[in-house]
Amino acid sequence: MHDALYFDGRSGALQLVTLQAENGMLHLAGAAVSQAYRLAQVTLGEPFLHAPALLYLPDGGHCEVADPAARAALAQALGFKPGLVLRWQRHWYAALAALVLLLAVGAAVWWYVLPAAAEKIAANIPASMDRSIGASALQGLQNKLLQPSRLSDQRIAEVRAVLAEVSPPAPRHPLRLLVHNAPMLGPNALALPDGTIVITDQMVRAMYDDSSLTPAESHDALAGVLAHEVGHVQGRHSVRVLARSSLTAAASAALLGDFSAVAAGIPAVLANLHYSRAMETEADSFAIAVLKSKGWSLEPLAKTFEWLDTVNNADPQHNMPAWMRQTLPYASSHPGNAERIARLRAAR
Ligand SMILES: [Zn+2]
């Protein structure tokens, strides 16, 4: 005889009953209840260490049995056999193994499946979409960060001529150069998916006016910077970043739910920083190949990166706020770093 709480499945009222299992039957007896069920039709819910056992009855009612001894006796009477998962979770090493497996699968999806899916998506985005993404990105930049250039017409014409020199015979999109004053961006250049290349006055001045480079060296440095941007257009990097960040953001949101939009965004941002570094290397390789094919020096570009590094470290005004770096992965990664400079010098 075991005490239990009985719910008939039709009303919310609970009734105190006693349970007795004998001759293949489960008998319920209480003040207003007297029922019997075949044991074979009664189901025992998954047992938890500290929660009452749940007995599901075939007519939709159920009983809750709190007493541990009664729970064990009922499980035995019902011939309850714990399933594989139940047996696993009783052993700490099995639980740990399951956790490790879960993390491994999660990591594999994160590092291999999502990037591969993003590449597939990006490959299916038509050129017309490149143009509309480029146009809206430019609109956003012009609203917030870009002002009319203060460089002389002659200097802008020179920059345009250098872009023409480094353009491939058949670019993915017709290349278009925009020169803008952009105090917030500082010395920078970026490529939009539609073939628009934006270079800041600050970047041009860094190579021509504020540097110790000779005019020929300034030309080679600018050619390197512009070829790097052409490399981004040819590699379709911004569309690939966009596909990747949208997919990772969606995956994090699905995983973390409404827990926090910020928390959901962090993995996406981290993934993109990693991704864009690989793309930077690809764009650098493109620039190195162009400069070498023309017989131009790589050293002025290395020197420019070196100079930008010091400027950006010394003058926080040139450093964009962190949130902006994340929304503009190209702009963020252009200031040189030791690794890129070393690579340029090694490629000579
Ligand atoms: Zn870049």
Image (spheres, helix red, strand yellow):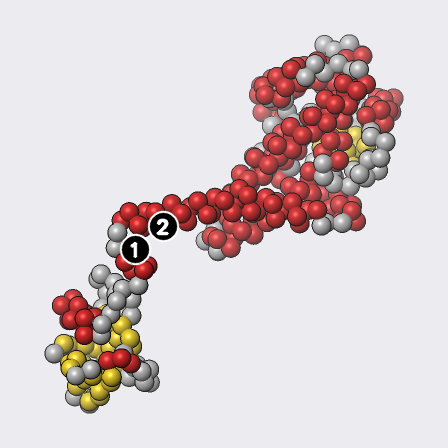
Asked whether disc 2 touches disc 1, contact meaning CB atoms under 8 Å apart, the reply is yes
Is residue 202 at least partly visible in the picture? no
Identity, as a three-letter code, of the amino acid under mark 2? Ala
Q: Quadrant of residue 293?
A: top right
Residue 19 is labelled as none
| 200 with respect to 56 (left or right) | right
| 344 in relation to 248, above or below | above
* x then y, percent, for residue 286: 73, 27
Q: Provide residue 344's location: percent of width, then percent of height.
A: 66, 18
Structural distance between the alpha carbons of marks 2 and 1:
9 Å
Question: What residue is disc 2 on?
Answer: 98
User: Horizontal and vertical percent for residue 110?
Assistant: 52, 45
Q: In which quarter of the image is the N terminus?
A: bottom left
Whether the residue carrying mark 2 lies under 8 Å from ligand 1 is answered with no
Residue flagged by tag 1: what amino acid is it?
Trp
Q: Quadrant of the C terminus?
A: top right
Local crowd size for mark 2, using a 10 Å CA cut-off: few (<14), some (14–19), many (≥20)? some
Q: Is residue 183 left or right of residue 158?
A: left
Q: Which residue is drawn at 30% across and 50% down?
A: 94
Vertical position of residue 192 compared to residue 17: above or below: above
What residue is disc 1 on? Answer: 88
Q: Sequence-wise, which precedes: disc 2 or disc 1? A: 1
**Which element type, helix, strand or loop, lies under badge 2?**
helix
Is residue 120 in sight in this rendering?
A: yes
Q: Where is residue 122 in the image (x, y as percent from the top left)?
A: 68, 46
Work out whether residue 213 or residue 41 is closer to the camera in this orientation and state it.
Answer: 41
